[in-house]
Image (tube, grey):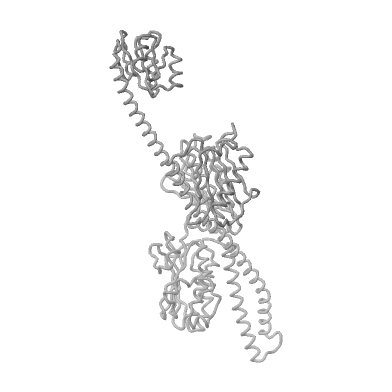
């Protein structure tokens, strides 16, 4: 049945329309308020307007009617109408009304309206599908960017809500094996008895999903989290009669929970597809998040074990050092003759005991050093220096040891020594280890020490050392210790710097050692922002190289930053590296603000200029997000207050935080 709205006060026209459409419903009115009430409430299909009606402002009425999904027909009589009226009309018919023409015109209009409505519905469905696809795409992108379980589930629920507009959603998940959580997202408040019903329903669903549930969930241990949109009304049991959809959150038989949604309006097949797709999308990120959590937990355990091991080694080493010192002192007294005369045999055995005590003391010192380095507690005294005094000291110190084996230590001084930012004592430790090793494993020939400046791109090394060396950039001082000893097989090069490792051969077994000298050297080089590696050929000799950055402001800052990071990790604190980048003038003005960039910030800082742009970098121990936010706000306030000094400037502000975690942020005015 078609519904007509006739806008006319003419009884004759009303009679004709009702006669032609006797089997349909015809509503007649001439009052403007009633016209629009009928359009809102009755929702007619066709509106017939009497063009001769005197009581109406046809221009306004026709314009308003055009906003409704109806077909309008104007009965044109004696009155003339301008385009403001006719522009808003779909069909026209003249008076006197021809009944057959009216019927044919309306039939045509109804067919047109049916086609238009069908097209409108199709467009609405298409728009809805496109919107849902866009929601799924955005949800998928957000899911891929997180490894936080709670955040992943929140993204999933938001995606389902945007796509399907549910009234109530219940999601069961597990924070840990013993912490089941029921997350309730509701349009309105949830009554206490409905909440109890949802908890019971969740437990029963959990037990029915898994034949052998890993954990027994009870109402008492089920934690509830509620997210309520509006508090204006309350849901009760009636919501359980709504249409609902349920989906487990599983991947490869790994169970992460489930979600169930309720909606008063029935769900379509397309809705079910969208729902299942969004739930499936979250499973793989949840699996990755679980793996990440397990990995973090394992790493924490390993770090704890590593700390305990280092502490144990440190304690044992200290405990061994005390009696060993007493033993060495006693042997020195005996060998000096102060304790009385000795026979030749006694002197021989006491000398052997002292030699082994010295050797054991060296091993203990190595153990202490490696534990300090790993704990980030090794003390460094960095200063501007050069390598010449270090090499000369090591050469003179080990010359006697070399001559005992008939070997020479050769070194040709550099023509132009370069400055490095380093701890001379630690460099002596590294070089002493390399030269003494060369002496131990060489039977004849010379030990040669060379030093030169090279660019990182010019370094030659075996592929197994690529990870340590590829990060180097710029100019470096390269020191090489070359021997003509037994050499190392290529397959063993990768293990030369491993802790407690000694390459197996008869000579290595004979000379012994802790196996910690080279690992310590490697750690010390890393602390100097350098690298160490070797090249060797069996029975022809070995070359051990280490490189140190040539001293400049940037390398010195990076060195300090590295030390502060180690200190932060050792103290279980954080270090913030803050960078402020702007024009030279702006940075210079900021540097003059002593109350802003005080000594705490500027103590370990680097200023780099590139044309008209300056970058100020600061390393702040125990720095955190609030530290950086504080600087942002202060700088913002400053440049706003002193526009005459700073002008309309752009400031790039970023910071990295290192310690237990790692965060990044950037900011631009």
Task: Relative to 372, say whether 215 is above or below.
Answer: above
**Extreme residue toward the front, this view:** 23
Task: Relative to 315, say whether 236 is above or below.
Answer: above
Expressed as whole percent of the image width and height from the top left, the position of residue 265 reads 49, 35
Q: Which quadrant of the rendered structure holds the N terminus?
A: top left
- Res 84 visible: no
Quarter of the rendering containing residue 188:
top right
Residue in front for this viewpoint, 310 or 61:
61
Task: Relative to 324, say whether 635 is above or below.
Answer: above
Residue 533 appears left or right of 369: left
Residue in front for this viewpoint, 526 or 606:
526
Residue in front for this viewpoint, 663 or 126:
126
Expressed as whole percent of the image width and height from the top left, the position of residue 83 reads 31, 15
Residue in front for this viewpoint, 280 or 477:
280
Number of labels in the image equals 0
Expressed as whole percent of the image width and height from the top left, the position of residue 420 reads 48, 62
Expressed as whole percent of the image width and height from the top left, the position of residue 630 reads 57, 43
The residue located at (40%, 17%) in the rendering is: 26
Task: Relative to 439, say whether 170 is above or below.
Answer: above
- Res 150 visible: yes
């Amino acid at each position: 049945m078609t519904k007509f709205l006739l806008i006319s006060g003419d009884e004759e026209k009303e009679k004709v329309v009702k006669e032609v459409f006797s089997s349909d419903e015809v509503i007649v009115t001439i009052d403007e308020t009633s016209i629009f009430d009928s359009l809102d409430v009755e929702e007619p299909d066709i509106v017939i307007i009497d063009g001769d009606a005197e009581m109406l402002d046809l221009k306004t009425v026709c314009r308003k009617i055009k906003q409704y999904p109806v077909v309008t027909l104007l009965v044109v009589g004696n009155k003339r109408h301008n385009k403001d009226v006719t522009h808003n009309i779909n069909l026209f018919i003249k008076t006197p009304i021809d009944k057959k023409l009216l019927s044919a015109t309306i039939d045509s209009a109804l067919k047109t309206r049916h086609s238009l409505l069908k097209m409108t519905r199709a467009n609405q469905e298409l728009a809805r599908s496109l919107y849902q696809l866009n929601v799924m795409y955005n949800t998928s992108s957000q899911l891929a960017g997180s490894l936080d379980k709670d955040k992943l589930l929140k993204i999933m629920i938001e995606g389902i809500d945007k796509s399907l507009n549910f009234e109530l959603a219940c999601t069961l998940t597990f924070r840990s094996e013993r912490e089941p959580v029921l997350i309730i997202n509701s349009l309105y408040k949830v009554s206490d008895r409905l909440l109890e019903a949802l908890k019971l329903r969740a437990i029963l669903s959990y037990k029915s999903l898994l034949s052998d549930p890993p954990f027994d969930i009870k109402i008492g241990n089920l934690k509830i989290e509620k997210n309520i949109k509006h508090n204006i009304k309350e849901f009760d049991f009636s919501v359980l009669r709504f249409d609902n959809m349920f989906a487990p959150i599983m991947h490869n038989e790994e169970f992460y929970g489930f979600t169930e949604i309720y909606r008063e309006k029935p769900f379509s097949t397309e809705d079910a597809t969208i729902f299942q797709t969004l739930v499936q999308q979250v499973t793989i990120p949840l699996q990755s998040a679980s793996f990440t959590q397990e990995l973090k937990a394992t790493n924490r355990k390993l770090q704890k074990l590593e700390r305990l091991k280092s502490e144990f080694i440190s304690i044992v080493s200290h405990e061994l050092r005390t009696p060993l010192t007493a033993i060495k002192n006693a042997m020195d007294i005996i060998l000096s003759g102060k304790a009385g005369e000795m026979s030749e045999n006694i002197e021989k055995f006491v000398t052997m005991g002292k030699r082994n005590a010295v050797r054991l003391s060296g091993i203990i010192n190595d153990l202490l050093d490696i534990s300090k380095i790993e704990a980030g507690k090794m003390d460094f005294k960095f200063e501007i220096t050069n390598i010449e005094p270090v090499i000369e000291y090591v050469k003179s110190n080990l010359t006697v040891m070399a001559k005992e084996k008939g070997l020479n230590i050769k070194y040709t001084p550099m023509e132009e020594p370069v400055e490095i930012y380093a701890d001379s004592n630690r460099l002596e430790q590294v070089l002493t280890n390399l030269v003494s090793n060369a002496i131990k494993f060489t039977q004849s020939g010379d030990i040669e020490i060379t030093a030169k400046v090279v660019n990182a791109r010019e370094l030659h090394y075996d592929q197994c050392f690529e990870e340590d060396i590829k990060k180097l950039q710029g100019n470096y001082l390269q020191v090489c210790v070359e021997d003509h000893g037994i050499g190392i097989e290529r397959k063993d090069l990768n293990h030369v710097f491993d802790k407690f490792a000694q390459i197996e051969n008869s000579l290595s077994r004979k000379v012994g050692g802790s196996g910690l000298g080279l690992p310590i050297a490697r750690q010390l080089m890393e602390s100097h922002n350098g690298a160490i590696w070797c090249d060797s050929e069996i029975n022809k000799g070995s070359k051990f190289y280490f490189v140190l950055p040539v001293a400049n402001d940037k390398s010195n800052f990076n060195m300090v930053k590295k030390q502060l990071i180690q200190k932060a990790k050792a103290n279980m604190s954080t270090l913030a590296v803050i960078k402020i980048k702007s024009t030279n003038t702006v940075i210079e003005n900021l540097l003059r603000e002593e109350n802003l960039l005080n000594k705490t910030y500027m103590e370990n800082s680097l200023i780099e200029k590139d044309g008209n742009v300056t970058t100020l970098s600061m390393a702040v121990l125990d720095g955190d997000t609030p530290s950086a936010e504080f600087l942002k706000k202060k700088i913002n306030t400053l440049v706003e207050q002193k526009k005459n000094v700073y002008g309309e400037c752009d400031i790039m502000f970023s910071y990295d935080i290192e310690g237990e975690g790692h965060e990044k942020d950037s900011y631009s005015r």
